[in-house]
Amino acid sequence: MALISKSQLYEHYTREFQKSRLSESFGGEQLYTEQLLSSARSFDSAQTYDIFLSHSYADKQEVAALYSFIRKIGYTVYVDWIQDPQLSRANITKSTANTLRTRMRNCKSLVYAHSLNAKQSRWVPWELGFMDAEKNRVAILPITEEKNRPDEYKGAEYLGLYPYVTSAKTSNTKKLELWVHDAINVYISMRQWLSGKNPYKR
């Protein structure tokens, strides 16, 4: 099991969008404006999403690829600028905060896409605190720069309070899965974690 890297997301992007005439580079604006936004439905208040993907908008290309990557594994994901493109997170307002509270209540968990940019976000700490109190299902998904992905994440300050997410194929089905870790040898599948179970030692 290993942390998710930018190169892994790039490889996923290449596989998924290589047939598109619009896909010229990983950083291309077309990735999210043309491919994802055209296929994503608007927010459905009757639907429960598996994951509220908390992130910095400065990482939009990586987040778009991560959104596609997680959905490909089989989870439903909410990303504000995909399902709610009318929202403006540039300014902290009561209206935006109320909308995000509603969206988070419709999600089973919050997964924080941790990056250098996300450290500067004004929204992320608030989202983590709200969802921790509301659902007690918060995890950190580090997007690592390393091509050779490390296996373990050591969160600094309050991030160390939460479990972290890796990806790897299951031993029985050989299908790619997300894993939630309390430590390198203390983990559980995302599906089990979403059902209320906690990581255990292997």
Image (cartoon, rainbow, N blue to C red):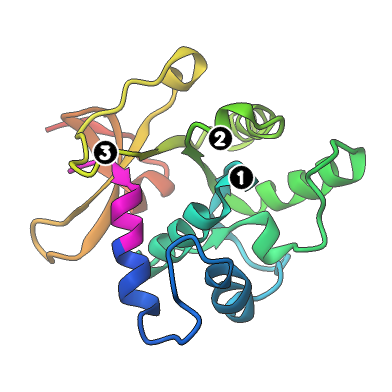
Q: Is residue 27 above or below residue 122?
A: below
* Mark-to-mark CA distance, 3 and 2: 16 Å
Q: Residue furthest front?
A: 24
Q: Is residue 148 above or below residue 38?
A: above
Write the start and end of the magenta stretch as one range: 1-10
Q: Position of residue 127 (x, y in %)?
A: 66, 35
Q: Amino acid at mark 1?
A: Ala
Q: Which numbered tag is attached to residue 117?
A: 2
Q: Which residue is mark 3?
A: 146
Tag 3 secondary structure:
loop
The residue shown at (82%, 51%) is 88
Q: Residues within 10 Å of mark 1 (few under 14, many from 20)?
A: some
**Which of the 4 image quadrants contains residue 85?**
bottom right
Labels 3 and 2 touching (C-beta < 8 A)? no
Tag 1 secondary structure:
helix
Q: Amino acid at mark 3?
A: Glu
From the viewer's perspective, tell me whether residue 188 is left or right of residue 118: left
Q: Which numbered tag is attached to residue 58?
A: 1
* Mark-to-mark CA distance, 1 and 3: 19 Å
From the viewer's perspective, tell me whether residue 132 is left or right of residue 24: right
Q: Position of residue 195 (x, y in %)?
A: 41, 49
Q: Position of residue 168 (x, y in %)?
A: 20, 52
**Which of the 4 image quadrants contains residue 10?**
bottom left
Q: Position of residue 143 (x, y in %)?
A: 39, 41
Residue nearest the viewer, comparing 157 with 163: 157
Labels 2 and 1 touching (C-beta < 8 A)? yes
Whether the magenta-drawn stretch holds residue 70 is answered as: no
Whether the magenta-drawn stretch holds residue 6 is answered as: yes
Q: Residue furthest right?
A: 94
